[in-house]
Amino acid sequence: MKSDLLSVWRRLPAPVRRAAHLIVGAPRGLYLSASKAIDDAAKTWAERNAQARARRRAWRRNLPAALPVTIVGFHGAVHGLGEGARMLARGFADAGVPVRAVDLSADVGFPVDLPAVFPAPTAEERGVVISHINPPELLRWARDTGGRPLEGRRHIGYWAWELEDVPAHWAPAFDLVDEVWTPSAFAADAIRKMAPRA
């Protein structure tokens, strides 16, 4: 069979054989140049994101801790995350710290079954924000509000996770927090693996 193909090939006119060589080589060359362009663009994009992240972190590091403490969470919902936010708020209040609360229950579709205990923060109050919600909800809240509730405020994320590896889509949330608190050393170890190095 090979000799039959070779004899057919040899019977083709020389210009056709030369053109065939060019066509056969073209896809590989095109692939290599496209692949290089994509790799270069990805590297540039990653470098720009890293620089922007460093600028945001440098700016946020200079924010002082101040009062009141605003707890963002599912205060009105009857479930574990809601109870966690309520307990955190009560703990600060019991310690004599002025507390404000932002209830996101209705924003994510949870029924609001419990009344508000703490007032919402005023626009003038700077203070510290502790978001007792996980990164998907934090990213959504920041997007929906344009990040205004976090402007000029120190922000602590209180994140909970019960597996060894946190989802990759949590990574962008690190840009929104000054620090992360967790309910356990296990959760801290899982989240620490994904945290960007300063």
Image (cartoon, helix red, strand yellow):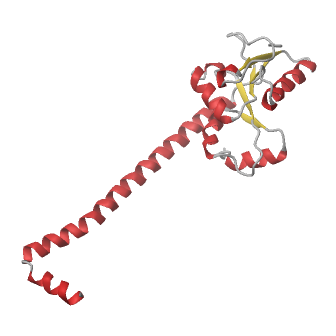
User: Where is the C terminus found, in terms of image quarters?
Assistant: top right
User: Where is the N terminus found, in terms of image quarters?
Assistant: bottom left
Instruction: Using the image as rendered, state which of residue 158 and residue 41 is in the foreground.
Output: 158
x and y percentages locating residue 174 in the rendered image: 65, 38
Q: Is residue 120 left or right of residue 96?
A: left
Q: Is residue 192 left or right of residue 139?
A: right
Residue 162 figure quarter: top right
Residue at horizontal 42%, vertical 54%? 39
Residue at horizontal 55%, vertical 42%? 50
Residue at horizontal 65%, vertical 19%? 149
Of all residues shown, which one is farthest toward the bottom? 3
Q: Is residue 162 above or below residue 93?
A: below
Q: Is residue 118 above or below residue 51?
A: above
Instruction: Using the image as rendered, state which of residue 180 and residue 168 is in the foreground.
Output: 168
Label total for image: 0
x and y percentages locating residue 150 in the rendered image: 66, 23
x and y percentages locating residue 169 in the rendered image: 60, 42
